Image (tube, rainbow, N blue to C red):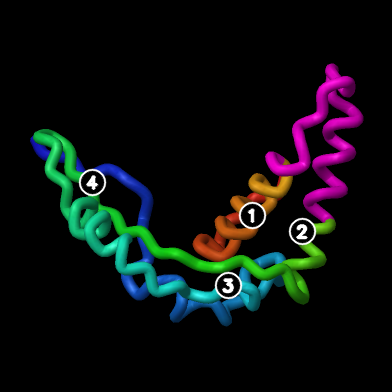
Amino acid sequence: MRQNVGFPLPRDGLSKRISKQNPIGIHAIGLHFLECPSLDRLNDFFGDLNLGERTIRGCLEAYTCKHAGTDKKLSISLENEMLELIEKSSSPDSPPPDDIRRTLIYLILTLYHMYPDYDFSF
């Protein structure tokens, strides 16, 4: 029996939905679609990858992240929450490096923009 697994991907692309407001009031004003021809080959590969009993359907898109407006406020808020969590953790002597925290913040902001119906707060 063939099964389809994976995450629901937007068919229309994020660029058509960036003006939507999610439940906590975050606007995707800082995301800008990037034309990236090198992703075309990967998209062809992942468009319908048959793995026997499983099929992977996916696409890759590139966007820039510029923190402005509510994104900037959310970024600062997430940074403060992470610092509080680090202070409360069992090993405060080894907080994650700044680049790891920034990467996590970018990931959370991206998830909010891609899936506005979900709350990714801590």
Residue positioned 23% across, 52% down in the render: 46
Element under label 3?
Answer: strand
Q: Amino acid at mark 2?
A: Ser
Residue 79 point in image, percent of width and height: 81, 49
The residue under label 2 is 75
Classify mark 3: residues with Cα within 10 Å, few (<14), some (14-19) or many (20+): many
Residue 73 point in image, percent of width and height: 81, 66
**In front of the other: 116 or 74:** 74
Residue 83 point in image, percent of width and height: 86, 40
Element under label 1?
Answer: helix
Q: Is residue 83 magenta?
A: yes
Residue 49 point in image, percent of width and height: 17, 47
Looking at marks 1 and 2 on the same chain, the residue that comes earlier in the sequence is marked by: 2
Q: Amino acid at mark 3?
A: Leu
The residue under label 4 is 56
Classify mark 1: residues with Cα within 10 Å, few (<14), some (14-19) or many (20+): some
The residue under label 3 is 31
